[in-house]
Amino acid sequence: MLLYTVLPLPSTPLFTAAGISRINTLAIIPAFLVGKFIIDTIMVHAGNYIVSNTTEIAAGLVSWQNIVGTIAGMLVVLLFLFIDWRRLLQEKKLTLNFNIWK
């Protein structure tokens, strides 16, 4: 329970699963509160660091490595988006389908 609440996942499925499995909520709430306190504390400190060091962080954002990495990442996402997965899996033929809006 504690591990799940520390991860950046929504808590609604956690309580839905607990309700379906009829787990006592008094056993869940302490671990949930501790986990949420830990992750919220980390987020507040990270936000404070970012606000107090904005100029240093922004100065390192624009470099040729970041631009090349961003373009490469976008190309990988577009490649996975435009691959005709049905044809690839069924016929073992790699084709690109640019008509993705149906």
Image: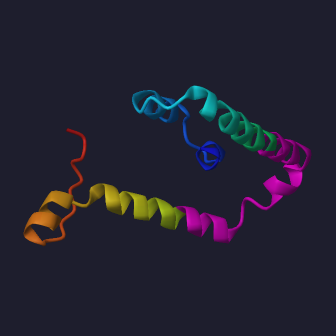
Depth check: give the residue in front, 44 or 13.
13
- Determine if the magenta segment contains residue 43: yes
Quadrant location, the C terminus: top left
Q: Residue at the spot x=85%, y=44% of the render?
A: 45
In the shown orientation, is residue 45 left or right of residue 101?
right
The quarter holding residue 85 reads bottom left
Compared to residue 99, the image places residue 93 above or below, namely below
Q: Residue at the spot x=50%, y=63% of the render?
A: 73
Q: Residue 75 at x, y = what percent?
A: 43, 63
Q: Residue 62 at x, y = what percent?
A: 72, 60
Q: Residue at the spot x=41%, y=58% of the render?
A: 77
In the shown orientation, is residue 49 left or right of residue 61?
right
Q: Residue 32 at x, y = what percent?
A: 66, 36
Task: Tell me the magenta residue range.
Answer: 42-70
Q: Residue 86 at x, y = what percent?
A: 15, 58
The way the protein has been coloured in the rendering is rainbow
Instruction: Name the dominant secondary structure of the magenta segment.
Output: helix
How many circles with numbers are drawn on the protein?
0
Depth check: give the residue in front, 22 or 70.
22
Quadrant location, the N terminus: top right
